[in-house]
Image (cartoon, helix red, strand yellow):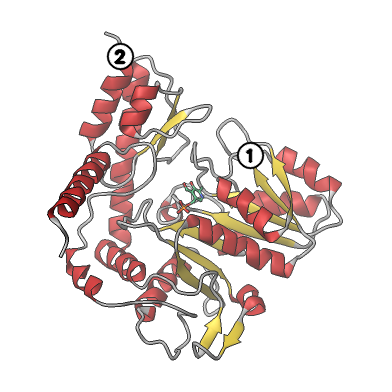
Amino acid sequence: MLQSQDLKRLDKLFSSMQEANGCFLGYPFARGFDYEPLWRFMRLAGNNLGDPFEPGTYRVNSYEFECEVIEFFAQLFRAPPREFWGYISSGGTEGNTYGLYLARELYPDAVAYFSQDTHYSVSKGVRLLGLDHCVVRSQSNGEMSYDDLAQKATRTRNRPAVVVANIGTTMKEGKDDTLKIRAVLRDVGIGAIYIHSDAALCGPYAPFLDPKPAFDFADGADSITLSGHKFLGAPMPCGVVLSRKRHVQRVMRAIDYIGSSDTTLSGSRNAYTPIILWYAIRTLGIEGIKRMFRQCEQLAAYTADELNSRGVGAWRNSNALTVVLPPVEESIKAKWQIATQDVSHLVITPGTTKRQTDALIEAITNRGR
Ligand SMILES: Cc1ncc(COP(=O)(O)O)c(C=O)c1O
């Protein structure tokens, strides 16, 4: 039994997280979901230790649901049937590290290229894995500069290339083009190429955009990752990582202790996040994902227009849910949790309301009046 002061602390924490959930516009984290039918699972121990596609000694898992989520995204990402593999990770960072790990095992002497707008998890990944790397300049909309990639790759054209392509950069939701990346590298004479698509935010809706960004397996990706909590909506961080099966077979080790193969980055893995993501995709379906995207995109368009009409230079990449604006002042940044570097941004994810964006617009444009 908790003592009353501890119960009070829990109540206080709940209120403060609830308040912060209500003013959360600067980072992508969908809200407003209802996973009540899954609460009973919290009474059970669960662990997805091991390879979800193999039976093991350890049965306290949700592999069946994990595999269905992987198959759903494999189809969306045009993976060759029966030649893909994947698992549900702890989030985009693990997915990026895993993609880089598979790439490093294939090409240990590769140079990793990624743009300056790339999420910090990638530079951490290359440091962890001891990969040589080269940062490529970005265009002003956040997309990689292919000219700069060509110039830099020419200097190391005798070594394999690993490229992390952003399918939605963190700050501006700029999208790199995997077809262009492959063409640039081939033109400078590099034949050994591995492309990892970091689709942390856009992964669930990128396949439905018009024009569809070039990022998936049919567009030459070797691995792809997305975050589960950013657009789909999971109350805790999680992610999906998919890869061509032959890359995973290279890292696979049989482990007697678990009666399964070790193919994932972490050992013990969350058994609940696969159930949550399965529930999300089953309840939404493809039509639901498209509908949620349309609603978010309309609100993003409205927000950018409204800011512009009030004299704030806001803009969006086409089909983006991220509204980029000049840096906001400290009090607004703190209240609305607005990510700010050289620019600020807000990200309209499912659960963001017009009331919230209106309140933010009001705070930005009426300050000091
Ligand atoms: C483009 C991109 N990649 C990776 C990540 C890392 O994802 P996570 O926070 O799920 O580890 C982020 C997070 O913001 C991101 O924006």
The spot of residue 175 in percent (x, y) is 54, 44
Residues packed near mark 1 inside 10 Å, few (<14), some (14 to 19) or many (20 plus): some
Residue that appears at 27% across and 67% down: 279
Amino acid under disc 1: Gln
Of the numbered discs 2 and 1, the one sitting upstream in the chain is: 1
The spot of residue 301 in percent (x, y) is 35, 33
SS for tag 1? loop
The spot of residue 338 in percent (x, y) is 39, 33
The spot of residue 4 in percent (x, y) is 12, 54
Image mark count: 2
Q: Viewer-proximal residue, 248 or 180?
A: 248
Label 2 within 8 A of ligand 1 by Cβ: no
In the rendered image, the vertical position of residue 354 relative to residue 118, given as above or below: above
Q: Which residue is mark 1?
A: 116
Q: Quick check: 313 left or right of 104? A: left
Residue that appears at 41% across and 23% down: 328
Amino acid under disc 2: Arg
Work out how far the residue at label 2 is from the one at label 1, CA to CA, in angstroms: 33 Å
Q: Quick check: 222 left or right of 232? A: right
Residues packed near mark 2 inside 10 Å, few (<14), some (14 to 19) or many (20 plus): few
Q: Quick check: 300 left or right of 98? A: left
Q: Which mark is residue 264?
A: none
The answer to which image quadrant residue 323 occupies is top left
Q: Quadrant of the N terminus?
A: bottom left
Q: Quick check: 202 left or right of 253? A: left
Query: Can you tell which of label 2 and label 1 is closer to the viewer?
Result: 2
Residue that appears at 68% across and 36% down: 137
Q: Which residue is mark 2?
A: 367
Q: Quadrant of the C terminus?
A: top left
In the rendered image, the vertical position of residue 27 relative to residue 220, given as above or below: above
Is the C-beta separation of discs 2 and 1 under 8 Å?
Answer: no
- Res 63 visible: yes
